[in-house]
Amino acid sequence: MNVARGMLEAPFRLAGTVQHYEWGDQRLLPDFLGQQPDGRPWAEWWVGAHPQAPSPVLTAPGTRLDQLIRRDPLAVLGGPVCDQFGARLPFLLKVLAVARPLSLQVHPTDEQASAGFHFERQGLESAPAEPLYADEWAKPEMLLAVTQFEAFAGLVTPEQAWDRLAPCAGPTLSALMARHLDEPTPSGLARLVNDLLRLDEDVVRLAVAELSDGMRAQLATEPDETGRRTTIARLAAEFPADPAVAVVALMRHVVLAPGDALAVPAGLLHCYTRGLAVEIQGTSNNTLRAGLTTKRVDVEEVLRIVDPNASPRHVTPTQPNVGLRRYVPGLPAFALDAVDLVPSTRVPVPPGLPAVVVTMRGTVDLDAGGTSTQLRRGEAAFVPASVCASVLLSGEGQAVVGYPGLAPLG
Ligand SMILES: [Zn+2]
Protein backbone atom coordinates (compact mmCIF):
# COMPACT_ATOMS: atom_id res chain seq x y z
CA MET A 1 0.00 0.00 0.00
CA ASN A 2 1.39 3.34 -0.93
CA VAL A 3 -0.84 6.19 0.15
CA ALA A 4 0.38 9.66 -0.56
CA ARG A 5 0.24 11.88 2.49
CA GLY A 6 -1.53 14.48 0.34
CA MET A 7 -4.51 12.15 0.14
CA LEU A 8 -5.35 12.99 3.76
CA GLU A 9 -5.65 16.69 2.95
CA ALA A 10 -8.94 16.38 1.05
CA PRO A 11 -12.16 14.31 1.28
CA PHE A 12 -12.07 10.97 -0.55
CA ARG A 13 -14.71 8.53 -1.71
CA LEU A 14 -15.57 5.33 0.18
CA ALA A 15 -17.52 2.20 -0.77
CA GLY A 16 -20.08 0.79 1.65
CA THR A 17 -20.73 -2.89 2.43
CA VAL A 18 -24.18 -4.49 2.14
CA GLN A 19 -25.26 -7.01 4.81
CA HIS A 20 -27.92 -9.45 3.61
CA TYR A 21 -29.52 -10.28 6.96
CA GLU A 22 -32.80 -12.17 6.80
CA TRP A 23 -34.94 -9.22 7.94
CA GLY A 24 -33.83 -6.91 5.13
CA ASP A 25 -36.06 -5.44 2.44
CA GLN A 26 -35.53 -6.74 -1.10
CA ARG A 27 -35.94 -3.38 -2.87
CA LEU A 28 -35.29 -0.34 -0.65
CA LEU A 29 -31.49 -0.63 -0.40
CA PRO A 30 -30.90 -1.71 -4.01
CA ASP A 31 -32.98 1.30 -5.04
CA PHE A 32 -30.99 3.61 -2.74
CA LEU A 33 -27.69 2.26 -4.07
CA GLY A 34 -28.79 2.30 -7.73
CA GLN A 35 -28.44 -1.48 -8.06
CA GLN A 36 -30.72 -4.23 -9.33
CA PRO A 37 -32.71 -6.24 -6.74
CA ASP A 38 -31.55 -9.88 -6.77
CA GLY A 39 -34.26 -11.58 -4.69
CA ARG A 40 -32.13 -11.50 -1.54
CA PRO A 41 -32.91 -9.38 1.51
CA TRP A 42 -30.69 -6.26 1.65
CA ALA A 43 -30.68 -5.30 5.34
CA GLU A 44 -27.85 -2.89 6.10
CA TRP A 45 -25.28 -0.80 4.26
CA TRP A 46 -22.22 -0.02 6.38
CA VAL A 47 -19.81 2.89 5.93
CA GLY A 48 -16.90 3.10 8.37
CA ALA A 49 -13.96 1.14 9.73
CA HIS A 50 -15.60 -1.69 11.69
CA PRO A 51 -13.26 -4.73 11.50
CA GLN A 52 -16.08 -6.91 10.09
CA ALA A 53 -16.58 -4.65 7.05
CA PRO A 54 -14.12 -1.75 6.77
CA SER A 55 -14.92 0.52 3.83
CA PRO A 56 -12.68 0.32 0.75
CA VAL A 57 -11.24 3.67 -0.35
CA LEU A 58 -12.42 4.12 -3.93
CA THR A 59 -9.80 6.71 -4.82
CA ALA A 60 -6.93 4.38 -3.73
CA PRO A 61 -7.80 0.88 -4.99
CA GLY A 62 -6.67 -1.88 -2.63
CA THR A 63 -6.77 0.43 0.40
CA ARG A 64 -9.35 0.36 3.20
CA LEU A 65 -10.26 3.04 5.72
CA ASP A 66 -9.06 0.95 8.70
CA GLN A 67 -5.63 0.61 7.07
CA LEU A 68 -5.36 4.38 6.63
CA ILE A 69 -6.29 4.84 10.30
CA ARG A 70 -3.61 2.37 11.43
CA ARG A 71 -1.03 4.04 9.21
CA ASP A 72 -1.64 7.60 10.39
CA PRO A 73 -4.27 7.79 13.17
CA LEU A 74 -3.47 11.36 14.11
CA ALA A 75 -4.00 12.70 10.58
CA VAL A 76 -7.11 10.61 9.85
CA LEU A 77 -8.85 10.90 13.24
CA GLY A 78 -7.30 13.99 14.86
CA GLY A 79 -5.84 14.38 18.35
CA PRO A 80 -9.06 14.61 20.42
CA VAL A 81 -10.46 11.37 18.91
CA CYS A 82 -7.15 9.51 19.37
CA ASP A 83 -6.98 10.72 23.00
CA GLN A 84 -10.47 9.46 23.77
CA PHE A 85 -10.78 6.34 21.61
CA GLY A 86 -7.24 5.37 20.56
CA ALA A 87 -6.60 4.58 16.91
CA ARG A 88 -10.20 3.75 16.00
CA LEU A 89 -13.04 5.58 14.32
CA PRO A 90 -15.60 5.62 17.14
CA PHE A 91 -18.73 5.50 14.99
CA LEU A 92 -20.21 3.44 12.17
CA LEU A 93 -22.82 4.87 9.80
CA LYS A 94 -25.45 2.57 8.33
CA VAL A 95 -28.57 2.69 6.23
CA LEU A 96 -31.11 0.14 7.49
CA ALA A 97 -33.94 -1.29 5.37
CA VAL A 98 -36.26 -3.25 7.66
CA ALA A 99 -38.97 -5.43 6.08
CA ARG A 100 -39.29 -7.97 8.92
CA PRO A 101 -38.52 -7.48 12.61
CA LEU A 102 -34.96 -7.47 13.82
CA SER A 103 -34.30 -9.54 16.94
CA LEU A 104 -35.48 -8.39 20.36
CA GLN A 105 -32.12 -7.11 21.57
CA VAL A 106 -30.04 -5.14 24.01
CA HIS A 107 -26.52 -3.68 23.86
CA PRO A 108 -23.96 -3.63 26.70
CA THR A 109 -22.03 -0.73 28.23
CA ASP A 110 -18.28 -0.47 27.51
CA GLU A 111 -17.55 -2.11 30.88
CA GLN A 112 -19.98 -5.01 30.28
CA ALA A 113 -18.66 -5.51 26.74
CA SER A 114 -15.03 -5.57 27.80
CA ALA A 115 -15.72 -7.99 30.67
CA GLY A 116 -17.85 -10.28 28.45
CA PHE A 117 -15.33 -10.21 25.61
CA HIS A 118 -12.40 -11.25 27.81
CA PHE A 119 -14.45 -13.79 29.80
CA GLU A 120 -15.49 -15.63 26.61
CA ARG A 121 -11.89 -15.86 25.40
CA GLN A 122 -10.26 -16.94 28.68
CA GLY A 123 -7.98 -19.89 28.03
CA LEU A 124 -8.87 -20.06 24.31
CA GLU A 125 -6.20 -19.86 21.62
CA SER A 126 -8.58 -18.52 18.97
CA ALA A 127 -11.87 -16.62 19.11
CA PRO A 128 -14.98 -18.68 19.97
CA ALA A 129 -17.04 -19.76 16.93
CA GLU A 130 -20.16 -17.73 17.73
CA PRO A 131 -19.23 -15.35 20.54
CA LEU A 132 -21.83 -13.29 22.40
CA TYR A 133 -19.33 -10.43 22.53
CA ALA A 134 -17.74 -9.66 19.15
CA ASP A 135 -15.56 -6.83 20.50
CA GLU A 136 -14.82 -4.82 23.65
CA TRP A 137 -17.04 -1.84 22.96
CA ALA A 138 -20.47 -0.47 23.77
CA LYS A 139 -22.91 -0.09 20.89
CA PRO A 140 -25.07 2.96 21.56
CA GLU A 141 -27.17 3.78 18.52
CA MET A 142 -29.28 6.59 17.09
CA LEU A 143 -31.82 6.20 14.31
CA LEU A 144 -32.84 8.94 11.92
CA ALA A 145 -35.99 7.90 10.08
CA VAL A 146 -35.91 8.25 6.28
CA THR A 147 -39.40 6.79 5.78
CA GLN A 148 -41.88 6.24 8.58
CA PHE A 149 -40.02 3.87 10.91
CA GLU A 150 -41.57 1.56 13.51
CA ALA A 151 -39.87 0.23 16.63
CA PHE A 152 -40.54 -1.09 20.10
CA ALA A 153 -38.18 0.30 22.75
CA GLY A 154 -38.20 0.02 26.53
CA LEU A 155 -41.01 -1.24 28.74
CA VAL A 156 -44.34 0.51 29.23
CA THR A 157 -45.36 1.44 32.77
CA PRO A 158 -46.77 -1.39 34.93
CA GLU A 159 -50.22 0.22 34.70
CA GLN A 160 -50.04 0.38 30.90
CA ALA A 161 -48.83 -3.22 30.83
CA TRP A 162 -51.95 -4.30 32.66
CA ASP A 163 -54.27 -2.13 30.57
CA ARG A 164 -52.81 -3.33 27.28
CA LEU A 165 -52.42 -7.00 27.98
CA ALA A 166 -55.39 -7.83 30.18
CA PRO A 167 -58.04 -7.51 27.41
CA CYS A 168 -56.22 -9.82 25.01
CA ALA A 169 -53.90 -12.01 27.09
CA GLY A 170 -55.80 -15.29 27.29
CA PRO A 171 -55.69 -17.62 30.32
CA THR A 172 -51.97 -18.51 30.18
CA LEU A 173 -50.63 -14.96 30.16
CA SER A 174 -53.38 -13.77 32.51
CA ALA A 175 -52.21 -16.22 35.17
CA LEU A 176 -48.65 -14.87 34.91
CA MET A 177 -49.88 -11.28 35.00
CA ALA A 178 -51.98 -11.96 38.07
CA ARG A 179 -48.91 -13.36 39.80
CA HIS A 180 -46.63 -10.40 39.02
CA LEU A 181 -48.84 -7.39 38.30
CA ASP A 182 -51.53 -7.85 40.93
CA GLU A 183 -50.11 -4.64 42.28
CA PRO A 184 -48.58 -2.95 39.24
CA THR A 185 -44.96 -2.12 40.17
CA PRO A 186 -41.78 -1.79 38.07
CA SER A 187 -40.22 -4.78 39.82
CA GLY A 188 -43.37 -6.85 39.14
CA LEU A 189 -43.16 -5.94 35.46
CA ALA A 190 -39.47 -6.88 35.36
CA ARG A 191 -40.31 -10.24 37.00
CA LEU A 192 -43.06 -10.82 34.44
CA VAL A 193 -40.57 -10.22 31.59
CA ASN A 194 -38.07 -12.60 33.22
CA ASP A 195 -40.70 -15.31 33.62
CA LEU A 196 -41.99 -14.89 30.06
CA LEU A 197 -38.53 -15.29 28.52
CA ARG A 198 -37.89 -18.44 30.55
CA LEU A 199 -41.20 -20.22 29.82
CA ASP A 200 -41.21 -23.77 28.45
CA GLU A 201 -41.83 -23.96 24.71
CA ASP A 202 -45.23 -25.66 25.05
CA VAL A 203 -46.46 -22.95 27.38
CA VAL A 204 -45.07 -20.26 25.09
CA ARG A 205 -46.93 -21.66 22.08
CA LEU A 206 -50.16 -21.59 24.03
CA ALA A 207 -49.56 -18.10 25.43
CA VAL A 208 -48.62 -16.63 22.03
CA ALA A 209 -51.58 -18.31 20.30
CA GLU A 210 -53.97 -16.94 22.93
CA LEU A 211 -52.42 -13.49 22.70
CA SER A 212 -52.68 -13.58 18.91
CA ASP A 213 -56.35 -14.57 19.07
CA GLY A 214 -56.99 -11.80 21.60
CA MET A 215 -55.24 -9.19 19.45
CA ARG A 216 -57.15 -10.26 16.35
CA ALA A 217 -60.46 -10.07 18.22
CA GLN A 218 -59.56 -6.53 19.32
CA LEU A 219 -58.51 -5.59 15.79
CA ALA A 220 -61.90 -6.76 14.48
CA THR A 221 -63.76 -4.32 16.71
CA GLU A 222 -61.41 -1.41 17.45
CA PRO A 223 -59.30 0.74 15.12
CA ASP A 224 -55.54 0.25 15.39
CA GLU A 225 -54.42 3.81 14.73
CA THR A 226 -50.72 3.36 15.50
CA GLY A 227 -50.46 -0.13 13.99
CA ARG A 228 -49.15 -1.55 17.28
CA ARG A 229 -51.54 -4.47 17.55
CA THR A 230 -51.29 -5.29 13.85
CA THR A 231 -47.52 -5.59 14.21
CA ILE A 232 -47.77 -7.77 17.33
CA ALA A 233 -50.27 -10.04 15.58
CA ARG A 234 -47.83 -10.26 12.65
CA LEU A 235 -45.00 -11.20 15.05
CA ALA A 236 -47.19 -13.88 16.65
CA ALA A 237 -47.91 -15.40 13.24
CA GLU A 238 -44.22 -15.36 12.28
CA PHE A 239 -42.79 -16.51 15.64
CA PRO A 240 -45.49 -18.73 17.25
CA ALA A 241 -43.10 -20.36 19.73
CA ASP A 242 -41.16 -17.26 20.74
CA PRO A 243 -41.78 -15.67 24.15
CA ALA A 244 -40.29 -12.41 22.83
CA VAL A 245 -43.67 -11.79 21.13
CA ALA A 246 -45.33 -11.42 24.54
CA VAL A 247 -42.48 -9.21 25.76
CA VAL A 248 -42.90 -6.90 22.76
CA ALA A 249 -46.57 -6.52 23.77
CA LEU A 250 -45.22 -4.98 27.02
CA MET A 251 -42.94 -2.50 25.27
CA ARG A 252 -43.35 1.09 24.15
CA HIS A 253 -44.40 1.37 20.55
CA VAL A 254 -42.50 4.11 18.72
CA VAL A 255 -43.41 5.37 15.25
CA LEU A 256 -40.86 7.84 13.87
CA ALA A 257 -41.85 10.22 11.07
CA PRO A 258 -39.20 11.04 8.45
CA GLY A 259 -36.66 13.34 10.15
CA ASP A 260 -37.39 12.06 13.68
CA ALA A 261 -34.43 10.64 15.58
CA LEU A 262 -34.33 8.15 18.44
CA ALA A 263 -31.33 7.41 20.69
CA VAL A 264 -31.02 3.88 22.11
CA PRO A 265 -28.73 3.74 25.16
CA ALA A 266 -26.99 0.68 26.61
CA GLY A 267 -29.36 -1.59 28.50
CA LEU A 268 -32.50 -0.60 26.56
CA LEU A 269 -34.51 -3.54 25.24
CA HIS A 270 -35.53 -2.79 21.65
CA CYS A 271 -36.78 -4.25 18.41
CA TYR A 272 -37.05 -2.46 15.03
CA THR A 273 -39.92 -3.70 12.94
CA ARG A 274 -40.31 -1.68 9.72
CA GLY A 275 -38.92 1.16 7.62
CA LEU A 276 -35.84 2.81 6.15
CA ALA A 277 -33.48 4.73 8.47
CA VAL A 278 -29.99 6.07 8.82
CA GLU A 279 -28.34 4.60 11.89
CA ILE A 280 -25.23 5.98 13.52
CA GLN A 281 -23.79 3.84 16.26
CA GLY A 282 -20.68 3.00 18.25
CA THR A 283 -18.16 0.94 16.25
CA SER A 284 -19.21 -2.38 17.74
CA ASN A 285 -21.25 -5.44 16.86
CA ASN A 286 -22.19 -6.39 20.43
CA THR A 287 -25.85 -7.39 20.26
CA LEU A 288 -27.44 -9.71 22.83
CA ARG A 289 -30.63 -11.31 21.57
CA ALA A 290 -33.73 -12.51 23.43
CA GLY A 291 -35.72 -13.79 20.44
CA LEU A 292 -37.39 -13.08 17.06
CA THR A 293 -34.30 -14.33 15.23
CA THR A 294 -32.49 -17.41 13.95
CA LYS A 295 -29.22 -15.96 15.29
CA ARG A 296 -27.90 -17.00 18.70
CA VAL A 297 -30.29 -16.20 21.56
CA ASP A 298 -29.07 -15.96 25.17
CA VAL A 299 -31.93 -15.06 27.45
CA GLU A 300 -29.88 -15.18 30.65
CA GLU A 301 -27.28 -12.75 29.30
CA VAL A 302 -30.01 -10.42 28.00
CA LEU A 303 -31.68 -10.43 31.42
CA ARG A 304 -28.32 -9.69 33.06
CA ILE A 305 -27.61 -6.74 30.74
CA VAL A 306 -31.08 -5.26 30.33
CA ASP A 307 -32.01 -2.19 32.35
CA PRO A 308 -35.80 -2.37 32.84
CA ASN A 309 -35.85 1.35 33.68
CA ALA A 310 -34.00 2.47 30.52
CA SER A 311 -36.08 4.50 28.10
CA PRO A 312 -35.62 5.56 24.48
CA ARG A 313 -34.90 9.23 23.88
CA HIS A 314 -36.19 11.34 21.03
CA VAL A 315 -33.37 13.60 19.86
CA THR A 316 -34.57 17.03 18.80
CA PRO A 317 -32.29 18.64 16.21
CA THR A 318 -30.84 22.13 16.48
CA GLN A 319 -30.64 24.27 13.33
CA PRO A 320 -27.31 26.14 13.41
CA ASN A 321 -27.39 26.91 9.64
CA VAL A 322 -30.04 27.21 6.96
CA GLY A 323 -30.67 23.70 5.61
CA LEU A 324 -28.91 21.98 8.53
CA ARG A 325 -30.51 19.82 11.23
CA ARG A 326 -27.98 18.76 13.88
CA TYR A 327 -28.77 15.67 16.02
CA VAL A 328 -26.55 15.51 19.11
CA PRO A 329 -27.42 12.64 21.46
CA GLY A 330 -24.84 13.75 24.04
CA LEU A 331 -22.43 10.84 23.49
CA PRO A 332 -18.72 11.17 22.65
CA ALA A 333 -18.94 8.48 19.96
CA PHE A 334 -21.18 10.27 17.46
CA ALA A 335 -23.41 13.08 16.30
CA LEU A 336 -25.24 13.40 13.00
CA ASP A 337 -26.09 16.29 10.66
CA ALA A 338 -28.88 16.08 8.09
CA VAL A 339 -28.28 18.63 5.36
CA ASP A 340 -30.99 19.75 2.92
CA LEU A 341 -29.43 21.52 -0.02
CA VAL A 342 -30.90 23.85 -2.60
CA PRO A 343 -28.61 25.45 -5.20
CA SER A 344 -28.04 28.64 -3.18
CA THR A 345 -27.06 26.94 0.12
CA ARG A 346 -23.59 25.98 1.28
CA VAL A 347 -23.33 24.09 4.56
CA PRO A 348 -20.03 23.45 6.39
CA VAL A 349 -18.92 20.03 7.66
CA PRO A 350 -17.79 20.25 11.34
CA PRO A 351 -14.06 21.07 11.19
CA GLY A 352 -11.17 19.16 12.80
CA LEU A 353 -13.06 15.88 13.15
CA PRO A 354 -13.22 12.76 10.99
CA ALA A 355 -16.56 12.70 9.15
CA VAL A 356 -18.52 10.34 6.89
CA VAL A 357 -20.78 11.98 4.30
CA VAL A 358 -23.54 10.03 2.53
CA THR A 359 -25.87 11.46 -0.10
CA MET A 360 -29.43 10.38 0.63
CA ARG A 361 -31.13 12.21 -2.25
CA GLY A 362 -30.04 14.17 -5.32
CA THR A 363 -26.40 15.16 -5.86
CA VAL A 364 -24.09 16.76 -3.31
CA ASP A 365 -20.66 18.38 -3.84
CA LEU A 366 -17.97 18.47 -1.16
CA ASP A 367 -15.69 21.42 -1.74
CA ALA A 368 -12.45 21.71 0.27
CA GLY A 369 -9.98 24.37 -0.82
CA GLY A 370 -9.35 23.66 -4.48
CA THR A 371 -10.81 20.12 -4.54
CA SER A 372 -14.36 19.01 -5.24
CA THR A 373 -15.94 15.57 -4.77
CA GLN A 374 -19.38 14.85 -6.18
CA LEU A 375 -21.60 12.27 -4.48
CA ARG A 376 -24.82 10.95 -5.96
CA ARG A 377 -27.54 9.17 -3.98
CA GLY A 378 -26.13 6.10 -2.20
CA GLU A 379 -22.52 7.30 -2.45
CA ALA A 380 -20.19 8.07 0.47
CA ALA A 381 -17.05 10.05 1.25
CA PHE A 382 -14.71 10.40 4.20
CA VAL A 383 -13.33 13.70 5.48
CA PRO A 384 -10.05 13.19 7.39
CA ALA A 385 -9.55 15.35 10.49
CA SER A 386 -6.37 16.71 8.91
CA VAL A 387 -8.21 18.58 6.13
CA CYS A 388 -7.20 22.20 6.74
CA ALA A 389 -9.57 23.92 4.35
CA SER A 390 -13.18 24.31 5.41
CA VAL A 391 -15.33 21.61 3.79
CA LEU A 392 -18.58 22.90 2.33
CA LEU A 393 -21.55 20.91 1.06
CA SER A 394 -23.49 22.29 -1.88
CA GLY A 395 -25.73 20.96 -4.64
CA GLU A 396 -29.37 19.90 -4.74
CA GLY A 397 -30.52 17.08 -2.49
CA GLN A 398 -29.93 15.73 0.98
CA ALA A 399 -26.83 14.41 2.74
CA VAL A 400 -26.13 13.04 6.20
CA VAL A 401 -22.82 13.71 7.93
CA GLY A 402 -21.69 11.49 10.81
CA TYR A 403 -18.83 12.54 13.09
CA PRO A 404 -17.70 12.07 16.72
CA GLY A 405 -19.77 13.92 19.31
CA LEU A 406 -16.67 15.18 21.10
CA ALA A 407 -16.30 18.86 20.30
CA PRO A 408 -18.70 21.50 21.56
CA LEU A 409 -20.71 22.41 18.48
CA GLY A 410 -23.00 25.35 17.86
ZN1 LIG B 1 -29.83 -2.40 18.46
Image (cartoon, grey):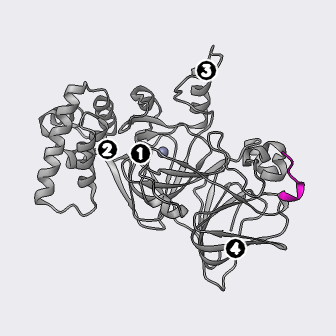
* Figure check: 33 above or below 77: below
Point out residue 365 in the picture as x, y percentages from the top left corner: 70, 73
Label 1 CB less than 8 angstroms from ligand 1: yes
What residue type is disc 2 on? Answer: Val
Q: CA distance from mark 4 to mark 1?
A: 36 Å
Callout 4: few (<14), some (14-19), or many (20+) C-alpha neighbours within 10 Å? some
Secondary element type, mark 1: strand
* Figure check: 342 above or below 282: below
Point out residue 360 in the picture as x, y percentages from the top left corner: 56, 67
**Which numbered disc flags the more N-terminal residue, 3 or 2?**
3
Point out residue 230 in the picture as x, y percentages from the top left corner: 24, 54
Label 3 vs label 2, nearer the camera: 3
Q: Mark 4 near mark 2, Cβ–Cβ under 8 Å?
A: no
Q: Residue at (27%, 59%) from the top-left corner?
A: 227
Camera-nearest residue between 400 and 406? 400
Q: Quadrant location of the N terminus?
A: top right
What residue type is disc 3 on? Answer: Arg
Membership of 2 in magenta stretch:
yes
Residue indicated by mark 4: 365
Q: Is residue 262 toward the left or the right of residue 92 in the image?
A: left
Q: CA distance from mark 3 to mark 2?
A: 32 Å
Q: Can residue 4 be seen in this snapshot? A: yes
Q: Mark 3 near mark 4, Cβ–Cβ under 8 Å?
A: no
Residue indicated by mark 1: 270
For the magenta stretch, what is the residue range? 1-7
Label 3 vs label 4, nearer the camera: 4
